Amino acid sequence: MSNHRFLLAAVVATTTALAAAACSKSDNSPSSSCAVTVGSVTTNVSAAASTGSIPVTSSCAWTAGSSASFLTITSGGSGNGNGTVNYSIAANTGSTRSASIAIGNALVSFVQAGALAPVGCTVTLSATTARINANGGTASIDVSAASTCGWTASSNSPFLTATANATGNGTVVITASANTGPARTGTVTIGGQSVTVTQDGGIFASFDLFDPSQTGGVTNTCQFRSSSGLSTTCTLRSTSFTSGSAAIVNYSWTVQYTYATAKVISASGDSPTVSFTDTCGQPGGATDDGALQPLDVTLTVTDSLGNTATAKSGTGSQSKLFVQLFNCGI
């Protein structure tokens, strides 16, 4: 009888432990396989204090956490299913800084601009406008301030970079990436003042080869060929263009090939075409089958603002070009 009692007690204890373990596993626990997505949020913010909210879409439990003390979750720090995380960003008194809020498996990263010049601190800029050409480059802005006056610089436009956290006099170098579209404008904040940067529209160089004696269209081979020994003239024509209002004003050509000796043709001016002429049957190069020699062409175009672009045969989208050297009478 006593054995039966001990066995019953063991069964009851085991059942109770299993039930307790099952109860301790909450249905609200986050699942590593459950995705969390967040809605649109403004993540590049000014130095001033600000607040915002992050829409959350999920089918499971989640929690939110901040990576820095200046970025505070004010409400909605956890949830089950859809929800909203509200946050605040403290005013920035130093240089540009960043932090993030993790919500389940989603991450929202913030960048806060550096502080404006302190009240009563005078910052003077050498210019409040700048121009950078289409190919990309830099512009420098000199900053004058008292030795005890701190200031920062930050970009407000994705194609511009400019960073600084300095005291007293200094120089801010603004860098623009190459522009492949129309003219564009952006701004940089230096010591609380806005500098407007204009970048010229893109300029693109390209050209085609024509051999009127052989074909009426574009070709990749100029044939020095004649049944009667006449000369052959081939023409290179620019197909370059700009995406802004500035027109192309200069075409600079260099054309090179070898036919018995090295031949070099150079031309520069406002004409979009250049021609070169040669004859069949020259010794040391021509054959009955037409020997092929590379035709090396370089075109540099310049627009009215001074922007340039260069195209070379056999490079990028430009096809390789050739001259074909025949004996006369073929």
Image (cartoon, rainbow, N blue to C red):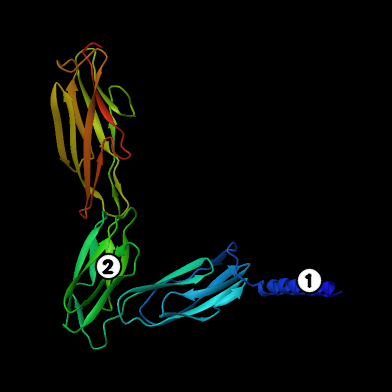
Q: Residue furthest bottom?
A: 120
- Using the image, tell me which numbered label, if any, was put on residue 162: 2
* Relative image position of residue 23 (x, y in whole percent): 70, 74
Location of the C terminus by quadrant is: top left
Residue at the spot 24% in from the left edge and 12% down from the top edge = 288
- From this viewpoint, is residue 257 visible? yes
- Using the image, tell me which numbered label, if any, was put on residue 11: 1
Task: Work out whether 42 lies above or below 272.
Answer: below
Query: Would you identify the image quadrant in which residue 290 lies?
Result: top left
Task: Work out whether 311 lies above or below 201.
Answer: above
- From this viewpoint, is residue 190 visible? no
User: Crowding near pointer 2: few (<14 within 10 Å), some, many (20+)?
Assistant: many
Q: Nearer the viewer, residue 284 or 91?
A: 91
Residue at the spot 60% in from the left edge and 66% down from the top edge = 31
Residue at the spot 26% in from the left edge and 27% down from the top edge = 322
SS label for mark 2: loop
* Horizontal relation, residue 305 to residue 156: left or right: left
Q: Label 2 to label 1, Cα distance in Å?
A: 73 Å
